[in-house]
Amino acid sequence: MAKHNQAGADQDWWRIWPEVFDDELAAFTRLGIEPRTIHKGNGILILETDWPVVGRSEAMLLRIGYSPLHPFFRPAVAAPNESLERHQNPLSRELCLLTQESGQWDSNQLVADFIQERLDHLLRVLEARKEARWADAAKLEEQAADPLMPYFAPASEDDSVVLFDGQAALPPAQHGLLEVVCSARYSRTNDAAFEGVLRQVKTSNGAAIGKWFGFRTEPKDAQILTGRWVKFTPPATTDARELLRLAEAELARQAVMQPSSVRKVNEVTHGSLSITGIVFPEEIKYGPQKNGAGCSWSPGVR
């Protein structure tokens, strides 16, 4: 096989195509923006800019990450000082400027021009939603649910899972009990791994809420575990201990008005394995209403 003598075969993209790099920087200059380089190496280029936004007195801080395969892959654009109601990852603060469908990114478009176009589009969507112009918002954004629950995935225990009815409605009470069918799950890295099915949500007195959910057949080694749940919207975090701490704090707050009810749900945490479910309003279909129930689980082993 002939040796590849062409320079740049394994170099950074800005070395392979210096004219592309020059064009990218020139596009920022044309828009009156001076980017700052905060990382440049191993094919990754990260710029930081103060992006002017119409109607705002202060610029929006943006961090722009160029892929090692630029210009063939979309850039990552984050707004670390912003907390937007939609179209932003609440953990990384990355903006959702395009849908995840293939063919959305135009490799011929310069990144500065892309941001100018898509950021304005995103802000118009948020303004329409803020003003309850839902028909206008629907024309501007992907008509899909934007749930909070996936952002808690990094906090999950390795190889463990709890299944539940994704179409369940938000329970009316503030806390209660859970009936979970649990069985051991094989894992090479986690001896305590388990899988569970939440088959019934209950009040603190044991009265069923909503429909029963489960499988027709259950594992032979399955056990019925009574857990607890509390309703509030936690911040998106990957720290499972922090989620459990917040759940305890919320139950303590609710105990001021309902001491005996909270005491009943807390009694189920005294076993060798306890499960605490955090239940919050979730968007399960596109629209202005968060009428579904999202859940985050915090198992405790004693």
Image (cartoon, rainbow, N blue to C red):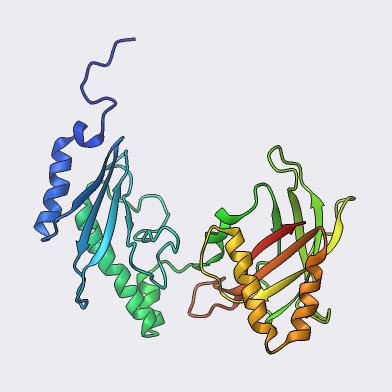
Q: Residue at x 13, y 43 (%)?
A: 22
Q: In the figure, is residue 195 to the left or right of 120? A: right
Q: Position of residue 59 (x, y in %)?
A: 21, 68
Residue at 42% x, 70% y is 86
Q: Is residue 136 left or right of residue 113?
A: right
Q: Give the image location of residue 195, x and y in percent.
A: 75, 53
| Quadrant location, the N terminus | top left
Front-lying residue, 46 or 1: 46
Q: Is residue 53 left or right of residue 86?
A: left
Q: Quadrant of residue 100?
A: bottom left
Q: Residue furthest bottom?
A: 257
Residue 172 is situated, as x and y percent measured from the top left of the image, at 68, 84
Most distant residue in the top direction: 1
Figure quadrant of residue 180: bottom right
Q: For the image shown, how many numbered marks are present on the structure?
A: 0
The x and y percentages for residue 122 are 32, 68
Q: Can residue 172 be spotted in the picture? A: no
Q: Nearer the viewer, residue 113 or 57?
A: 57
